[in-house]
């Protein structure tokens, strides 16, 4: 719908000019361009969220909370809109959509955990005190489980004095609308020397106090939190395990649906007896093709 309206806005002026020159302007339907432009701008935030959340090559679960805030902000009725009598339809639609979004969409615990594990939004700037406290408690609980599991298996979490990082594979750049929700980079230094016992208790607090501007991943414009956790794996091993566990969960089922579509293309009438394991391998290679190097 959004693309259709954008196409109408882009082409209507040229079409009217051509039709007028040929004397067939009466054949074109009458379109209220200001109304179409208003509807298009109303759909724009939803289009941005859908395009970003349905990405299949990067983590997307951490975007749910900020996307929710972004959509709520886009549905706030401005004073000019409230005073404009011709915008009554848009005002009603915004208020009703905002109301339905609050009623029908519930943020899951995984959404809050992912938002906190995204270093750019770990302070949850727009969250209430209760929501922030709840999210931090969830992280501490999961972190405790990981530490207890390590201790039960006879392993220990160690800290390396040096932190190494590798450059991520260049991918398509998105202009992130989530930059408005990034935390201020004014925290204390991350390179603190702590013992293993202290580290187990203070790992999460150490993460909250880190300076992002001293991290190589702070220059990452793709909003991929795994770049940060790859860099900080030696410093925050338990949180890195939790991050890898959380960020493997996609925010939507779009990737799964694409995989089923790929399977439908691979398995045809002439290839109905193909081995299932071969189908799995072909789908895997197909989905990871953009990340493979020759």
Image (tube, grey):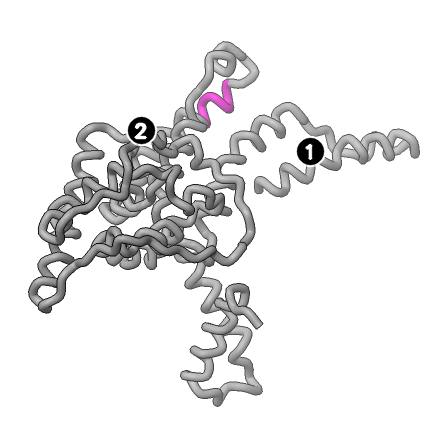
Which residue is at the front of the view, 220 or 118? 220
- Badge 1 element: helix
* Residue 201 higher or lower than 209, as above or below: below
| Res 126 label | 2
User: In the rendering, at what x and y percent does residue 91 appear?
Assistant: 47, 21
Q: Residue at x 36, y 49 (%)?
A: 228
Which residue is at the front of the view, 151 or 180? 151
Which residue is at the front of the view, 199 or 40? 199
Q: Residue at x 48, y 87 (%)?
A: 274
User: In the rendering, at what x and y percent does residue 206 appear?
Assistant: 21, 42
- Which image quarter is the C terminus in? bottom right
| Res 9 label | 1
The quarter of the picture where residue 157 lies is bottom left
The quarter of the picture where residue 186 lies is top left
Earlier in the chain: of badge 2 and badge 1, it is 1
* Residue 51 higher or lower than 259, as above or below: above
Q: Is residue 73 left or right of residue 107?
A: right
User: In the rendering, at what x and y percent does residue 76 appear?
Assistant: 42, 23
Q: Which residues fall within the magenta stretch?
A: 88-93
Q: Is residue 28 left or right of residue 188?
A: right
Tell me the CA gap for discs 2 and 1: 35 Å
Q: Residue at x 50, y 24 (%)?
A: 90
Q: Residue at x 47, y 12 (%)?
A: 79
Crowding at dot 1, Cα within 10 Å, few <14 / some 14-19 / many 20+, comes out as: some
């Amino acid at each position: 719908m959004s693309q259709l309206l954008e196409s109408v806005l882009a082409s209507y002026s040229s079409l009217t000019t051509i039709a007028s020159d040929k004397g067939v302007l009466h054949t074109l339907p009458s379109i209220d361009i200001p109304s179409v432009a208003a509807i298009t701008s109303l759909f724009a935030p939803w289009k941005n969220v859908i395009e970003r959340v349905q990405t299949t090559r990067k983590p997307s679960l951490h975007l749910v909370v900020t996307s929710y805030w972004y959509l709520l902000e886009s549905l706030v009725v401005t004073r000019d809109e409230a005073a404009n009598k011709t915008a009554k339809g848009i005002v009603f639609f915004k208020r009703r959509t905002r109301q339905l979004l609050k009623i029908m969409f519930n943020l899951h615990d995984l959404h809050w955990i992912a938002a906190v594990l995204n270093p750019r939004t770990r302070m949850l700037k727009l969250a209430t005190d209760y929501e922030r406290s709840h999210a931090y408690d969830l992280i501490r609980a999961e972190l405790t489980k990981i530490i207890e599991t390590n201790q039960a298996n006879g392993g220990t979490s160690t800290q390396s004095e040096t932190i190494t990082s590798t450059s991520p594979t260049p991918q398509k750049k998105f202009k992130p609308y989530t930059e408005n929700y990034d935390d201020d980079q004014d925290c204390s230094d991350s390179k603190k020397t702590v013992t293993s016992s202290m580290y187990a208790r203070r790992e999460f607090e150490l993460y909250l106090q880190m300076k992002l501007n001293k991290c190589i991943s702070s220059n990452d414009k793709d909003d991929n939190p795994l770049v940060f956790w790859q860099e900080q794996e030696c410093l925050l091993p338990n949180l890195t395990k939790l991050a890898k566990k959380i960020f493997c969960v996609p925010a939507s089922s779009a990737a799964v649906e694409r995989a089923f579509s790929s399977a439908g293309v691979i398995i045809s009438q002439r290839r109905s007896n193909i081995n299932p394991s071969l189908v799995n391998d072909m789908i895997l290679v197909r989905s990871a093709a953009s990340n493979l190097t020759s």
